[in-house]
Image (cartoon, rainbow, N blue to C red):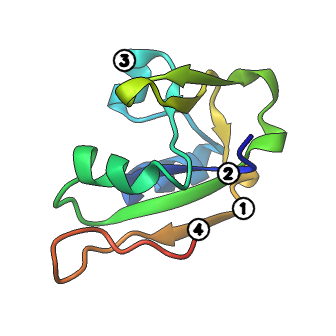
Amino acid sequence: MHRTIYKILPSRLWSLALETGAFKGSALDVTDGFIHFSTAAQVRETAARHFAGETDLLLVAVPTAELGNALRWEPSRRGQLFPHLYAPLAVDLASWVKPLPIGQDGSHVFPDL
């Protein structure tokens, strides 16, 4: 399926995760019982829908091979399968973490995925 999935989050949450060694999720993730991720094809829409206008965000890339059975692909928007992680994310599993700035047009500027 997909080799890499992506998490958008405020930089302060990633800083907390670095202190403890694991990202346990945002408030929404904790409420839903899993960590929401997106594929490369989904992440721009996720940013526009759920993070519009937010600054100081990071984009975290995570290889799916290391996540095992805790990663499940479940239907969400328009029946698309989204990656959901039913476990904390060990920060050392991230292949990279990059800033997700807002461009002049008001949308987030993504690195090459």
Residue 71 lies, with reference to residue 12, above or below; the image says above
Instruction: Give the CA separation, mark 1 to mark 4.
Output: 12 Å
Q: Earlier in the sequence, mark 2 or mark 3?
A: 3
Instruction: Give the CA separation, mark 4 to mark 3.
Output: 28 Å
Which amino acid does the dot numbered 3 rest on?
Thr
Q: Earlier in the sequence, mark 1 or mark 2?
A: 2
Left or right, 73 with reference to 98: right
Residue under label 1, please give it.
Answer: 95
SS at badge 3: helix
Q: Earlier in the sequence, mark 3 or mark 1?
A: 3
Q: Earlier in the sequence, mark 4 or mark 3?
A: 3
Left or right, 44 with reference to 50: right
Instruction: Give the CA separation, mark 1 to mark 2.
Output: 6 Å
Which residue is rendered at x = 75% and y = 42% of the image?
A: 64
Which residue is rendered at x = 63% and y = 30% of the image?
A: 88
Residue 48, percent from left and from top: 25, 53
Instruction: Give the CA separation, mark 3 to mark 1.
Output: 26 Å
Q: Nearer the viewer, residue 92 or 47?
A: 47
Residue under label 2, please give it.
Answer: 62
Residue under label 4, please give it.
Answer: 113
